[in-house]
Amino acid sequence: MTNIPRLNEKNICFVFIDLQDRLLARIHNAERIVSRNALLVEAANLLGLPYVSTSQYRKGLGEVVPAIAERVHTSILDKTSFSCVADEGINKDLDRLKRELVVLSGVETHICVLQTCLDLLGRGRQVAVVADAVGARTQMDHELGLKRMERYGALSVTAEMVIYELLGRSDSPEFKKLLPLIKGM
């Protein structure tokens, strides 16, 4: 029997990577990336799913955008390493969560998202990258970053794929709460 990774509430956690104004200012489709990430944070909050949110060198690059910062219920962890896993504090948080499947989103696809993904895969974790919730300054960097992550075993998903798979059905109170957000974001 083939092991087909499925997203469920018992095996998943999210990492929202470096959604900061100064980084997003130069990224194609930044508004959509922020919207997709805000939707994922809302879903994680509603479903009670764990997540980590990071910033890259906050002193130089500023705060996480308000649309994300106001929704996040945990501390935003600042890092200077590109990979979240290379940061001791963030890595400890991820280990503490004890979730086998990590869902990555944020910026930039070919730098922090890629390096985090490769490090997680190298440590035996399953990774899903939310293709419509990651971005880079150039389309080529974005596409090649996604391609490289997939090549080494990451699942490529969309925000809606993640949410609908986690919900599993349309007759739950959570679905009814998330549906307007899905349609509106």
Image (spheres, rainbow, N blue to C red):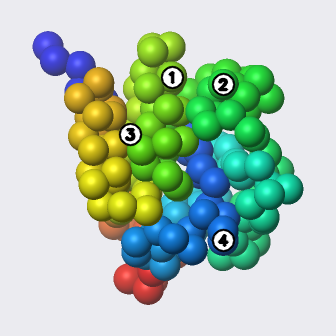
Report the residue marked by disc 3.
128
Quarter of the view holding residue 179: bottom left
Q: Is residue 23 left or right of residue 91?
A: left
Q: Nearer the viewer, mark 3 or mark 2?
A: 2
The reply to whether the C-beta atoms of the residues labelled 2 and 1 are less than 8 Å apart is yes
The reply to whether the C-beta atoms of the residues labelled 3 and 4 are less than 8 Å apart is no
Q: Nearer the viewer, mark 4 or mark 1?
A: 4
The kind of residue on which mark 3 rests is Ala
Q: Position of residue 88 (x, y in %)?
A: 77, 23
Q: Position of residue 182 (x, y in %)?
A: 41, 76
Q: Is residue 78 left or right of residue 10?
A: right
Report the residue marked by disc 1.
119
| Residue at far left of view | 1
Report the residue marked by disc 2.
86
The kind of residue on which mark 1 rests is Asp
Report the residue marked by disc 4.
21
Instruction: Give the distance between the C-alpha atoms of the residues marked 1 and 3, in whole angstroms.
Output: 13 Å
If you read the primary sequence from the N terminus, does the residue marked by circle 1 or circle 3 appear first? 1
Q: Nearer the viewer, residue 184 or 47?
A: 184
**Disc on res. 20:** none
Rendered position, 99 above or below 176: above
Q: Secondary structure at mark 4?
A: helix
Q: Nearer the viewer, residue 33 or 8?
A: 33
Q: Residue at x 49, y 42 (%)?
A: 111
Q: Residue at x 23, y 29 (%)?
A: 151
Instruction: Give the distance between the C-alpha atoms of the residues marked 2 and 4, in whole angstroms.
Output: 23 Å
Q: Residue at x 33, y 34 (%)?
A: 149
The kind of residue on which mark 2 rests is Ala
Quadrant of image for the N terminus: top left
The kind of residue on which mark 4 rests is Asp
Q: Is residue 133 left or right of residue 91?
A: left
